[in-house]
């Protein structure tokens, strides 16, 4: 059994134990295997095992790596977890099933235009910059309701919210806020939790976990 498959099984086992502890057996989150920077040869054993959700943060890299694989297996779901530039939207809409990083009205308009042209409707998360960090994308939480209503008015399929908490702080503080914000706009899906804090994110009802190094190993 390939090491990536072993790693995935170990993560699934730890999630199962966590859900038992929380008495929340029915609430199994999706694991997005974050394959960014890894060559497709390192990812294929996981695809062959049957895992379906993968995360990339660059559109061009995703197109090069995944076009053939997705053509051969239409069950694979690709998640864009990195910043999306407006000039890459037409390629992103074509290859990504989920976009986790909607962060501006300009981007929302561009996705709306492109999904109409291509007759494809990706599922979208609004990225929130909870730590108000200048180096990170995302809307401010104060603007969430207004931005959500604007995005819905364009016909976007907004299914949830996404955050990347500050690295040097306790992520629980931010995970709690995400729960409250989701309730405000009555959405079920939350994209939060990475290799270092995914079990913590489960406590706060994350439904999509973005796990990279714990599955694929450290990036060189």
Image: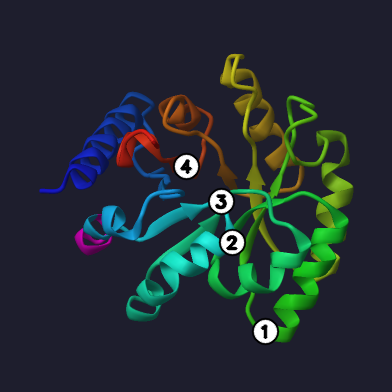
Q: Which residue is mark 4?
A: 210
Q: Secondary structure at mark 4?
A: strand
Q: Position of residue 32 (x, y in %)?
A: 43, 49
Left or right of 142 in this view: 74: left
> Which label's residue is closer to the chain start, 1 or 4?
1
> Which label's residue is closer to the chain start, 3 or 4?
3
Farthest-out residue, top: 169
Judge whether 150 appears above or below 164 on screen: below
Q: Residues within 10 Å of mark 2 (few under 14, many from 20)?
A: many
Task: State the separation of the CA atoms marked 2 and 1.
Answer: 17 Å
Point out the frontmost of discs 1 and 3. 3
The residue located at (54%, 67%) in the rendering is 97
Q: Secondary structure at mark 1?
A: helix
Q: Which residue is mark 1?
A: 118
Q: Secondary structure at mark 2?
A: helix
Residue range in magenta is 46-50
Q: Which residue is mark 3?
A: 57
The residue located at (80%, 68%) in the rendering is 110
Q: Which residue is mark 2?
A: 59
Task: State the separation of the CA atoms marked 1 and 4.
Answer: 27 Å
The residue located at (83%, 36%) in the rendering is 140
Tell me if label 1 and label 4 are in contact, CB under 8 Å. no
Q: Position of residue 212 (x, y in %)?
A: 40, 40
Q: Position of residue 220 (x, y in %)?
A: 39, 36
């Amino acid at each position: 059994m390939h090491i990536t498959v072993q790693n995935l099984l170990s993560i699934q086992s730890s999630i199962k134990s966590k859900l038992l502890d929380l008495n929340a057996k029915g609430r199994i989150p999706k694991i997005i295997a974050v394959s960014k920077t890894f060559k497709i040869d390192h990812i294929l054993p996981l695809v062959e095992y049957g895992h379906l959700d993968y995360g990339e943060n660059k559109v061009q890299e995703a197109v090069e790596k995944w076009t053939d694989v997705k053509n051969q297996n239409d069950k694979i779901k690709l998640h864009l977890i990195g910043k999306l530039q407006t000039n890459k939207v037409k390629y992103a809409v074509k290859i990504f099933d989920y976009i986790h990083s909607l962060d501006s009205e300009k981007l929302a308009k561009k996705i709306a235009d492109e999904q109409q042209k291509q007759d494809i409707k990706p599922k979208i998360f609004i990225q929130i910059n909870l730590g108000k960090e200048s180096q990170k994308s995302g809307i401010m939480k104060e603007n969430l309701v207004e931005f959500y209503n604007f995005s819905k008015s364009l016909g976007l399929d907004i299914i949830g919210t996404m955050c990347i908490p500050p690295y040097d702080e306790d992520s629980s503080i931010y995970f709690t806020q995400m729960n409250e914000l989701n309730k405000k706009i009555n959405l079920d899906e939350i994209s939060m939790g990475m290799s270092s804090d995914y079990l913590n994110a489960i406590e706060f009802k994350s439904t999509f976990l973005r796990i990279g190094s714990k599955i694929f190993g450290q990036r060189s």
